[in-house]
Image (cartoon, rainbow, N blue to C red):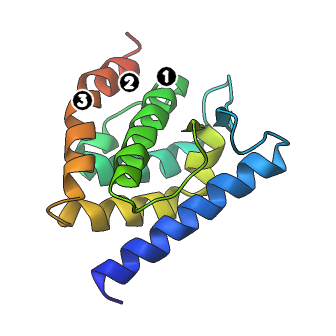
Amino acid sequence: MTPALALLVAGATLAVGAAGTAQASGVPAQRPAAVGVFNDDPTPQQQEDLRQVAGAIWDDSLAAGWNMNSDVSDVLSQATGEILKCSAAFALVPRPPGFVPGLGYLVSYWKNLRDYFLVVSKNRTYGACVKATALNYRSAIEMASAGI
């Protein structure tokens, strides 16, 4: 599969997943929604899924040392939303307006997100979305992991 086709497939999967999740929750697609927001800390499996997404944005060795608590999942949700918003600006990922990915979205689509982030980070134009987001959210995710 070519990188361009991988981007399209991953983007379409993420967009359909976002719309489907919003529709399944009864939230209209045009209304901002935090999909799959949980108040408790993620389960061990969810923590591993979150670690995979974080590793695709920053680095696997950084993500391996982070405490994947609910604060980290919130920061990771915000960072993921920023990458998707940036990508949408490049017309890669159509998504419902105001969509904010929550823990449920991250753990449901972790593989698609990881694969998408890994592909776009290698593309000079779209990689800027991942790199800028990684830079902008690095301190926040480090502090969330430390419980600050």
The single residue placed furthest to the bottom in the displayed view is 1
Tell me the residue at 27%/38% (across/down): 133
Residue 48 in percent (x, y) is at 49, 49
* Position of 134 relative to 87 (above/below): above
Q: Nearer the viewer, mark 3 or mark 1?
A: 3
Number of numbered tags placed on the structure image: 3
What residue type is disc 3 on? Asn
The residues bearing labels 2 and 3 have C-alpha atoms spaced at a distance of 16 Å
Q: Earlier in the sequence, mark 2 or mark 1?
A: 1
Mark number for residue 136?
3
Q: Earlier in the sequence, mark 3 or mark 1?
A: 1
Decide: few, some or many residues near mark 2? Use Cα within 10 Å; few <14, some 14-19, many ≥20: many
SS of the residue at dot 1?
helix
The reply to whether the C-beta atoms of the residues labelled 2 and 1 are less than 8 Å apart is yes
Q: Is residue 147 left or right of residue 37?
A: left
Query: Residue 40: in sight, yes or no?
Result: yes
Q: Earlier in the sequence, mark 2 or mark 3?
A: 3
Tell me the residue at 36%/90% (across/down): 1
Residue 79 in percent (x, y) is at 39, 36
Q: Which residue is mark 1?
A: 71
What residue type is disc 2 on? Ser
The single residue placed furthest to the left in the displayed view is 124
Tell me the residue at 24%/58% (across/down): 126
Camera-side residue of 21 and 106: 21
Mark number for residue 145?
2
Q: Is residue 121 left or right of residue 14?
A: left
Q: Is residue 57 left or right of residue 88?
A: left
Q: Is residue 15 left or right of residue 134?
A: right
Q: Nearer the viewer, mark 2 or mark 1?
A: 1
